[in-house]
Image: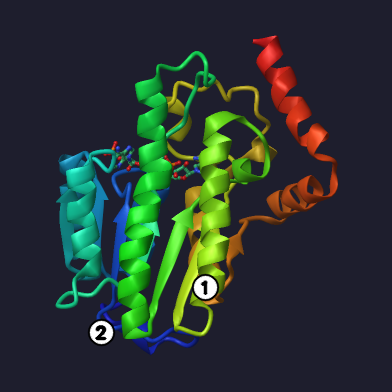
Amino acid sequence: MAKGARSAAANTPAYACCMPTALITGASAGLGLEFARQYAEEGFDLVLVARTGSRLHELAEECGSRFGVTAEVLVADLVDRAALERVAERVRSTEAPIDVLVNNAGLGLKKSFTENPLEREEAAFDLMCRAVLVLSHAAATTMKGRGSGEIINVSSVASFIAGGTYSAAKAYVTVFTEGLATELAGTGVTATALCPGFTHTEFHERGEMDVSNLPEIAWLNAPDVVRTAIADSRAGKAVSVPSVRYQAVVGLLGLIPRSLVRGPVVAARRRR
Ligand SMILES: NC(=O)c1ccc[n+]([C@@H]2O[C@H](COP(=O)([O-])OP(=O)(O)OC[C@H]3O[C@@H](n4cnc5c(N)ncnc54)[C@H](OP(=O)(O)O)[C@@H]3O)[C@@H](O)[C@H]2O)c1
């Protein structure tokens, strides 16, 4: 699709500029990379954020040559407060406005809370909670003033169970985003918590998690997850759960007693 074609498409929200821009954290791999490709295909300019500059520059070149869009690279470790503030400043820019913020960067925690060094837990918290809070604040206040914009915060189906600090961090993201969506209602700005199940990315390998026993039915593909997220964000949904099977899982988790939600997690820990 040619650059800018998206702005003429049906069901398109108003953006600050005819060439809208999406800022995506964790764009060097997995879901973030897929968000970048799908927005670029629609004619969005991009701001790509992650720690691995070489991968971001490669992706920026690819999006430029395939889709004719401009992609800025912002190398930043979002655990680092000064680096995070640089990204927040970019989000607040009024000269080059950000129309869509995707808070996607995240990591898996293989070990349990008491087995992990505190620094590892703090880094995970800063990446998956603090960075989401800071960048959402920068985006929501700027977009609200302008009267348009979308925020997608990548959470997880894990936010609906009690599976350690990863679940707790994602529960924060889901509940925070739902509250933000309510606060922003009627302002022209939307907030959506994306809650995927297991998705083929680098996530489990990087976290050294053994997922070899999972049946194929448990797995989602990044392109499908991202397509659903973009559509649900445009539809103004506060929570997006890709796939009917995971929607059924989340529905069921809401019905059963909380002790049963904790049960399988506790049992899995005891088996290790
Ligand atoms: N895959 C799944 O099964 C699944 C399921 C539910 C939810 N999620 C969530 O989906 C999101 C994306 O994960 P993914 O599956 O795409 O994982 P992934 O393939 O491992 O990608 C993670 C991305 O986050 C970036 N990142 C990690 N630490 C960072 C830091 N300190 N500062 C800046 N960027 C950082 C990585 O880039 P650099 O290493 O270059 O910094 C990479 O681009 C995460 O929030 C994850 O929790 C994943």
Return the x and y of residue 240 as percentages of the image width and height.
59, 61
Q: Is mark 1 within 8 Å of ligand 1?
A: no
State the residue in front, 271 or 80: 80
Looking at the rendered structure, the secondary structure element under dot 1 is helix
Q: Which x, y percent locates residue 255?
A: 84, 49
The quarter of the image that holds ligand 1 is top left
Which element is circle 2 on? loop
Query: Which mark, by number, is residue 183?
Result: 1
Residue located 40% across and 16% down the image: 117
Q: Earlier in the sequence, mark 1 or mark 2?
A: 2
Q: Is residue 185 visible?
A: yes
Q: Residue at x 28, y 38 (%)?
A: 79
Query: Which residue: 53% across, 44% down?
Result: 170
**Quarter containing the C terminus:** top right
Image quadrant where residue 82 sits: top left
Is 23 placed left or right of 13 in the picture? left
Residue name at image x 25 percent, y 80 percent:
19
Tag 1: amino acid? Glu
Q: Position of residue 88 (x, y in %)?
A: 24, 58
| Numbered badge on residue 259 | none
Which residue is labeled 2 in the image?
A: 17
Task: Indicate whether 14 appears above or below 81.
Answer: below
